[in-house]
Image (cartoon, rainbow, N blue to C red):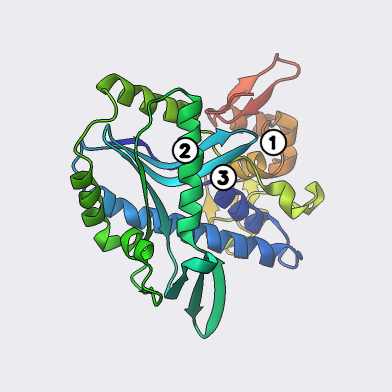
Amino acid sequence: MIVKRRSIPLRILIDEALLRRLPLNHPKRAEILQDLLIRRAGLKGEQDLDYHINLLHETDFHIFQSIRLPYGKNFFQIDFLLLSPKFILLIEAKNMPGIIEFEPVLGQVIRTYNEKVETYEDPLLQVKRQREQLRRWLQDHHFPSIPIEFIAAYSNSATTLRNSTSDREVYERVCKAGKLVFKIEEYKQKYSHNFLTDKEFKKISKQILKSHIPEGSHLHLFNIGRSDILPGVSCPSCHHIPMKRVSANWLCTSCGATSKDAHHQAVADYFLLVSPTISTKQFKEFLFFPTRKMAADAIGKMGLKPIGGKRNRVYIRPESTI
Ligand SMILES: [Zn+2]
């Protein structure tokens, strides 16, 4: 069963919000778009593997999607962690079209795609590091030792995998998505003995879930000033900023579209890019409400969580805490 489902990574949400709100000639747009495409491809790779992992018998594993655990001052992130009382399986998801040539002795893979040759780290090295970190993490939490297996799975059907040095580990641990369920079957055959009692199994599962820390904002990496962020409600049809408030509607002065709730996206962008809190005054100014009364009425209907007293009240996202 799936114990922890992935959510859309904050990094993707922030990149998308930035592309909505930076001027078209802003020098960082290309870098942000590149980052977004890489992150979206990664997410797609993980989502494509879901289908294959869902073919597993419901009760065989506790499945954690995209789990991020603290270790020392750092974190380690695992695309899929499958926990059973017999073994743990880590799966690194890859979504890369092209010819992927493994060079395990050098710890790299060479990708040839659209006549471009690029070098990446061998994904088996990545997942081996995760295995080591998880092993120590389990030890630090005083859990019994349990075998930890690992696989790198390529989900893109336009990927050709090559193992020209006939490396055994690559044959055993790298596969296309369609083979994943059979690989997992092999591990199930290999481990017939329970390393964990039912109680220990449930305890580890709970501890992993409890320890998961979602990735924080990476906005600082782009060095973008508050004044670079365009205020205003963005048109859902043509992305023009700002829309104009006309009675209880938003009107796009560029394409003529109207919307009742386009300000929800603007407030979500504000939380992602400007501040985790918003006052009625900030709401009015960022969204260009003509009057304070209209702003107060609209913010009151948004289902945000108010904090502070009447004089210094601000709002946060309903699910967040400060
Ligand atoms: Zn428009």
Q: Which residue is mark 1?
A: 283
Q: How packed is label 1: few (under 14 Cα within 10 Å), some, or many (20 or more)?
A: many
Beta carbon of the mark 2 residue lies under 8 A of ligand 1: no
Q: Residue at x 65, y 60 (%)?
A: 32
Distance CA(mark 2)–CA(mark 1):
44 Å
Of the residues under marks 2 and 1, which one precedes in the sequence? 2
Beta carbon of the mark 3 residue lies under 8 A of ligand 1: no
Q: Residue at x 64, y 27 (%)?
A: 315
Label 1 SS: helix
Of the residues under marks 3 and 1, which one precedes in the sequence? 3
Beta carbon of the mark 1 residue lies under 8 A of ligand 1: no
- The amino acid marked with disc number 1 is Phe
Image spot of residue 38 (x, y percent): 54, 62
Q: Is residue 234 visible to the viewer in this orientation of the structure? A: no
Label 2 SS: helix
Q: Residue at x 27, y 23 (%)?
A: 197
Image spot of residue 85 (x, y percent): 27, 31
